[in-house]
Amino acid sequence: MDALKEKILQSGKVIDNRLVKVDSFLNHQVDIELLNKIGKEFQKRFGNKNVTKILTLEASGIAIACITAQYFNVPVVFAKKHEANNLDKNRYETKVYSFTKDTLYNIKVAKEYLQPADKILIIDDFLAYGQAMAGLIDLVKQAGAEIAGIGIMIEKSFQKGREMIKDPDIQLESLAIIEAIQNGKITFNK
Amino acid sequence: MDALKEKILQSGKVIDNRLVKVDSFLNHQVDIELLNKIGKEFQKRFGNKNVTKILTLEASGIAIACITAQYFNVPVVFAKKHEANNLDKNRYETKVYSFTKDTLYNIKVAKEYLQPADKILIIDDFLAYGQAMAGLIDLVKQAGAEIAGIGIMIEKSFQKGREMIKDPDIQLESLAIIEAIQNGKITFNK
């Protein structure tokens, strides 16, 4: 998706050969106009999947998931990373390791918000090593719901997250795929 | 705002005389259609304020802030609660105590996303004791920016958060004001 790739090149900050920060339009400040383009694009790619719900992970996924949900007329559910005193104890949970934050999270969703009849579109900002995505897939499977597809904004293909998913039947769409980051330069393969 | 009050009565879960959980449409599952009504309502109330940016706090504020931003054509900035290895060190920060989570947070915003020329609409899901709101106001003041207004979805007036703000010149609008929660029953005063 050209608008996204241009934005990454223009406003992404390359930190090192593994990391590009997109705080100026996604992870801290949010460019709502760009997210609307992204939402429309996900609708084009998954519009025929009878999606009943969009699942994402707090906090970075919430903005894209909510804007995208408008094009599907479905609710969003965001899995929680941080314990709240008032979170339902009747929940699905699974462990996720974050390389960015060097932390092991327990991510969880209250059982009532993922039903066996649901067709879930999983949306996330990044696909890197695939840890968070594997966790989200696990939550959907625990609920006995169907995965209608996976929509990623930015995939870093050199970190092999796609291989973590291991299911050729799941349609995975990334709107920008970064093949390499070298000497401050980002190369896309799509 | 009637649609919101009805939703709270219909789907809110009263936990005790201080706490009502709105996980089914806001804090875990998100009702995007309702948020669009809320966004339009904020636009009615603050549309004449020349808002340049919407500021909120992760994670619960992100959904409302992003949907609302579409009616103002401005970006969203969400203040961060949790430390990330790659968050800019050049930032404003302030301490916020959360009664719900019984935790002291350091909330922060990278300096580049709050500029002195900005007119900031602060949006949040709840106004309870006012700790988070006081923190957000402090961040805007540190940046030397102007507060165009404060938009709250649900105010619990019996927890006196409004008094924390202490500035009669700031327009504060709450779309539902809960006066009391007693024996499982919610009473609104607006």
Image (cartoon, coloured by chain):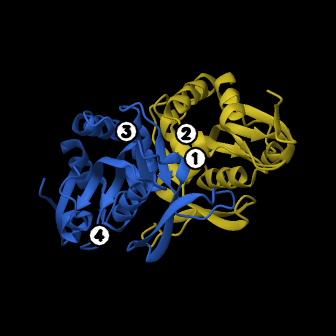
Chain colours: A yellow, B blue
Which image quarter is the N terminus of chain B in? Answer: top left
In the image shown, does A165 or B80 lie closer to the viewer? B80
The subunit carrying tag 4 is B
- In the rendered image, residue B176, in percent from the top left (x then y), is placed at 21, 52
Label 1 – label 3 distance at C-alpha: 17 Å
In this rendering, do the residues under marks 1 and 3 share a single chain?
A: no
- In the rendered image, residue A132, in percent from the top left (x then y), is placed at 69, 54
- Pointer 3 residue: B68
- Pointer 2 residue: A64
Q: Amino acid at mark 1?
A: Gly
The residue positioned 53% from the left and 41% from the top of the image is: A30
Horizontal side, residue B39 vs residue A40: left or right? left
The crowding category of the residue bearing disc 2, from other C-alpha atoms within 10 Å (few below 14, some 14 to 19, many at least 20), is many
Label 4 – label 2 distance at C-alpha: 30 Å
Please identify, in this view, whether the residue under mark 1 or under mark 3 is nearer the observer: 3
Q: Which mark is residue B129?
A: 4
The crowding category of the residue bearing disc 3, from other C-alpha atoms within 10 Å (few below 14, some 14 to 19, many at least 20), is many
Q: Which mark is residue A100?
A: none
Q: Is residue B87 visible?
A: yes
